[in-house]
Image (cartoon, rainbow, N blue to C red):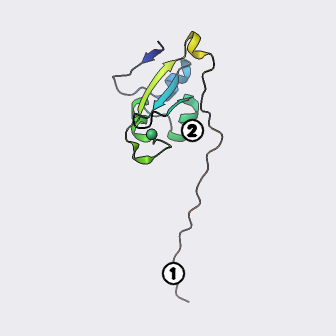
Amino acid sequence: MPETYAPKHRDYPLSKLNDTMRLVRVRCRYCKRLHNYAPSDLIQIFGDVDVDSLAFRIKCENGKDHGRLEVEAFVPTGREAVGLRIRRLVAIKINRVPIWREDPA
Ligand SMILES: [Zn+2]
């Protein structure tokens, strides 16, 4: 069994996981999608937020209506660490949205 850490108190920021080599596992109950993330990647997107709050911030990539995701910090141990795939951040694409205004001629 993987060692898990279930923070029941507030304010457990992602940066704290970085320090202890933990990863963040995100699982969708609806479609069983599961990904492991490096805390440093998540910080780039969400900032150094509380780990528990990610359940509300991350949306399932298979559908935004899949509801709240399961989020847990864990340390990959022994056998589990072998072949463990980590979803790494490649780039953050920023949408450019034009905003228009009607000016009198
Ligand atoms: Zn899903």
Q: What residue is shown with label 2?
A: 44
Residue located farthest toward the front when viewing the structure as drawn: 31
What residue is rendered at 56% in x and 15% in y? 80
User: Between 48 and 93, which is closer to the camera in this rendering?
Assistant: 93
Q: Position of residue 51 (x, y in %)?
A: 43, 29
In the picture, the disc for residue 64 is none
Question: What residue type is disc 2 on?
Answer: Gln
Residue located farthest toward the bottom when viewing the structure as drawn: 105
User: Do tag 1 and tag 2 residues touch (Cβ < 8 Å)?
Assistant: no
What residue is rendered at 66% in x and 39% in y? 90
Q: Position of residue 47 (x, y in %)?
A: 51, 38
Q: Quadrant of ligand 1?
A: top left
Q: Position of residue 92 (x, y in %)?
A: 61, 45
Q: Position of residue 84 (x, y in %)?
A: 60, 22
Question: What residue type is disc 1 on?
Answer: Glu
Quadrant housing residue 76: top right
SS class, disc 1: loop
What residue is rendered at 45% in x and 34% in y? 49
Mark 1 residue crowding within 10 angstroms, few (<14) / some (14–19) / many (20+): few
Q: What residue is shown with label 1?
A: 102
SS class, disc 2: helix
**Which comes before the other along the chain, label 1 or label 2?**
2
Q: From the viewer's perspective, is residue 1 above or below residue 88?
A: above
Gap between marks 1 and 2, in whole Å?
36 Å
